[in-house]
Image (spheres, rainbow, N blue to C red):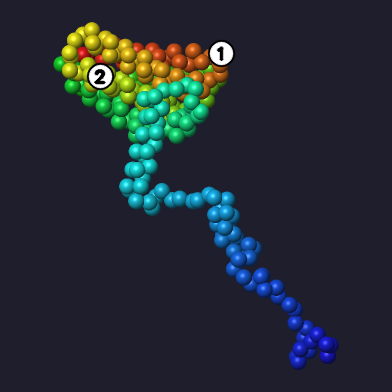
Amino acid sequence: MTPYSNSNGTIPIPVPRHSLSSSNPHLNPGQNNQNNISESGLTLSNTLTEPVWDTMERDLLRIFNNLKLVVLPNPFREDPGKALRDWDLWGPFFFVVFLGLTLSWSASIRKSEVFAAAFAVLAAGAIVLTLNVLLLGGRINFFQSISLLGYCLFPLDIGALICMFKIHFLLNVIVASVTSAWSSWAAYPFTNLAVKAPRKALALYPVLLMYISVGFLIIAIG
């Protein structure tokens, strides 16, 4: 019997205490990953199980933040491409429905066709803008185009609401012209970011043409 053996004649093998602990990364890799995520400041969220009000609050906050970029357009802001990255379809859907309803209420005949024209203009504008930017070597997808054009309809929504009262034809022309310019200027920072410098004017041209067409539609119906 050796000095290191027990009464049975076998030599015990020492087992490190930390190897039996649940904090060992080899035995519990999931917990180790969670600890690393917590230390790095990252949090994992599951939106499928969150309350409905939290989802609505997050979507409304995104709509409000994107709308601020349209109401106060500034091509020299610190992050002009934020609205393109944080795009959504709830805001554009609301603004195009509001525009269609306002124009249909102003129209004396063919109200349903006028309402459908608002959706057709937005869809055609998004397709043209997407293809135009891609052909110019830029980067944008179809849903980003819908989000951009839909949010920038907000000034024209205001113009259509004012012209719905049919105060005076000259006032309608002024309001439609100002709101068309406002919408075009609001879309400028985002289209400006999507393409390179020598081709920015070519990217903005179809957007400007679309908002001018909506302005003429407001004048004609009003």
What's the residue type where badge 1 is placed? Pro
Image check: 174 left or right of 65? left
Kind of element beneath mark 2: helix
Looking at the rendered image, the quarter that the N terminus falls into is: bottom right
Q: Nearer the viewer, residue 64 or 129?
A: 64
**Label 1, residues with CA under 10 Å away: few <14, some 14-19, many ≥20:** few
Q: Position of residue 117 (x, y in %)?
A: 28, 20
Looking at the rendered image, the quarter that the C terminus falls into is: top left
Image check: 70 left or right of 171? right
Q: Position of residue 126 (x, y in %)?
A: 40, 22
Outermost residue to the left: 108
Q: State yes or no: discs 1 and 2 in contact (Cβ < 8 Å).
A: no
Image check: 66 left or right of 95? right
What's the residue type where badge 2 is placed? Ala
The answer to whether any part of residue 217 appears in the image is no
**Label 2, residues with CA under 10 Å away: few <14, some 14-19, many ≥20:** many
Picture residue at 31% right of the left edge, 11% below the top: 177
Picture residue at 21% right of the left edge, 8% below the top: 169
Q: Nearer the viewer, residue 182 or 52?
A: 182
Q: Which residue is mark 2?
A: 160
Picture residue at 30% right of the left edge, 26% below the top: 96
Query: What label sits on residue 36 in the rendered view?
Result: none
Marks 1/2: CA–CA distance = 35 Å
Which is nearer the N-term, disc 1 or disc 2? 2
Q: Which residue is mark 1?
A: 198
Q: Position of residue 199 (x, y in %)?
A: 53, 14
